[in-house]
């Protein structure tokens, strides 16, 4: 299934019009550059008149008399002064009237035109206008304003060529745009590949586009734009501020409202604070957490008080730390113990 391209219709008033669905077989066709080149060359060749011609020696006036006698002069023999080698003589192998027309099948012409329109559509240079002039009188100023809006031109004059395709019966638009520089106006039946490629933008009137699509066997589909969405409702916050400004209380949440109807306090935190305060007045402990905190605080000073005594006892009971001796000290100690033992044996 071919793709469908949607284009917004530009109106003279500037307000958004309807959307038009362009058939994919025409405006989304394959762009065959060699085919378009062949068709353009054939079109330019067919535009040549082919009336060029030159005179041969038989067409040049004069030259009926022999310049000089045949023999005896020592020169080359000549029969006429209008021979090609003489000035003013005839032309050899010059151009003659002919036709340069090339035969191009209709399907090739249609495929090339569809490819050119598809190229302009893919680059966003195809525009549809509902009308250029509002009313029954031609107006070049109004038409130029609409045309600049359609093609996105910022200056007073158009910098690039524009092709405008109108309906054959739309004489008002033709008269309004025929004197504007860089604007070429064609009817839908005159649309061709060369003019599409020679112009940067292609602007259709809605009637001309419908006629062109109908000629190719299709049907133009117009899609109305959806209506604007209604304005959003006022936000709850803004409504509450308005209510406060008017002296009315703000709306309460459903849960708090139900609690208020049952006679309970709306918030749980104030109730807990009041409960803890009442318990403090009765002399009771407020809660489990304060009791734990008191116990932990009480244990810490006791532990701190017992630490010095434990240190004293540990100093008395702790044995002396032996220092590690070097290898020489070990040898001395061992030798000394051996000498003592020998003395004991002698005694």
Image: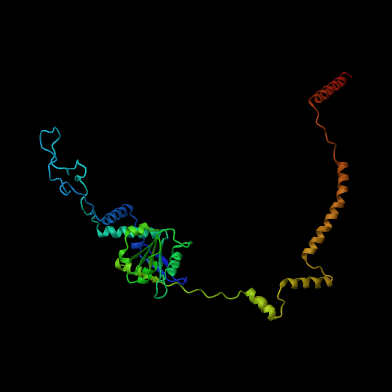
Quadrant in which the N terminus is drawn:
bottom left
Residue 168 occupies quadrant: bottom left
x and y, in percent, of residue 233 in the image:
58, 76
Residue 241 visible, this orientation:
yes
Report x, y in % for residue 86: 20, 41
Q: Nearer the viewer, residue 180 or 29?
A: 180
Task: Locate the C terminus and report the quarter of the image it occupies.
Answer: top right
Q: Residue at x 77, y 65 (%)?
A: 288
Does residue 121 appear left or right of residue 277 in this picture? left
Does residue 37 sit above or below 315 in this rendering? below
Of residues 312 and 182, which is closer to you in this image? 182
Colour scheme: rainbow
To which quarter of the image does residue 93 belong?
top left
Q: Is residue 155 left or right of residue 301?
A: left
Q: Position of residue 24 (x, y in %)?
A: 35, 63
From the viewer's perspective, is 63 left or right of 11? left
5 or 156, nearer to the observer: 156
The number of numbered badges drawn on the structure is: 0
Q: Residue at x 33, y 57 (%)?
A: 194
Query: Which residue is found at the position 78% from the left and 25% from the top?
Result: 327
131 shown above or below 81: below
Q: Nearer the viewer, residue 143 or 306?
A: 143
Residue drawn 29% across the image and 53% down it: 41
Q: Does any portion of residue 252 appear in the rendered image?
A: no
Q: Quadrant of residue 136?
A: bottom left
Position of 33 with respect to 9 (left or right) is left
Q: Position of residue 144 (x, y in %)?
A: 43, 66
């Amino acid at each position: 299934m071919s793709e469908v391209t949607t284009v917004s219709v530009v109106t003279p008033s500037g307000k958004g019009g309807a959307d038009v669905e362009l058939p994919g077989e025409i405006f989304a066709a394959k762009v065959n550059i060699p085919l378009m080149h062949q068709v353009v060359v054939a079109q330019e060749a067919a535009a040549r008149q082919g009336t060029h011609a030159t005179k041969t020696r038989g067409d040049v006036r004069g030259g009926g008399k022999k310049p000089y006698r045949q023999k005896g002069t020592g020169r080359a023999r000549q029969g006429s002064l209008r021979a090609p080698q003489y000035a003013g003589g005839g032309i050899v192998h010059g151009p003659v009237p002919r036709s340069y027309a090339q035969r191009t099948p209709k399907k090739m012409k249609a495929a090339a035109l569809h490819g050119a329109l598809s190229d302009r559509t893919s680059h966003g240079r195809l525009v549809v206008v509902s009308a250029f002039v509002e009313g029954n009188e031609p107006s070049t100023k109004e038409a130029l304003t609409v045309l600049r809006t359609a093609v996105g031109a910022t200056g007073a004059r158009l910098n690039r060529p524009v092709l405008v395709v109108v309906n054959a019966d739309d004489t008002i638009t033709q008269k309004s745009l025929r004197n504007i520089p860089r604007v070429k106006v064609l009817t839908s039946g005159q649309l061709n590949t060369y003019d599409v490629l020679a112009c940067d933008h292609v602007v259709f009137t809605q009637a001309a586009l419908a006629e062109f699509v109908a000629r190719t066997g299709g049907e133009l589909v117009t899609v109305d734009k959806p209506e604007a969405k209604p304005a959003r409702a006022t936000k709850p916050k803004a409504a509450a501020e308005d209510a406060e400004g008017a002296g009315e209380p703000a709306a309460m949440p459903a849960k708090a409202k139900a609690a208020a109807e049952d006679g309970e306090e709306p918030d749980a935190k104030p109730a807990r604070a009041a409960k803890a305060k009442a318990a403090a007045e009765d002399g009771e402990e407020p809660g489990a957490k304060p009791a734990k905190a008191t116990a932990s605080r009480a244990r810490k000073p006791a532990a701190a008080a017992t630490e010095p005594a434990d240190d004293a006892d540990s100093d008395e009971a702790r044995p002396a730390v032996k220092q590690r001796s070097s290898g020489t000290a070990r040898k001395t100690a061992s030798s000394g113990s051996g000498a003592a033992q020998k003395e004991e044996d002698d005694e």
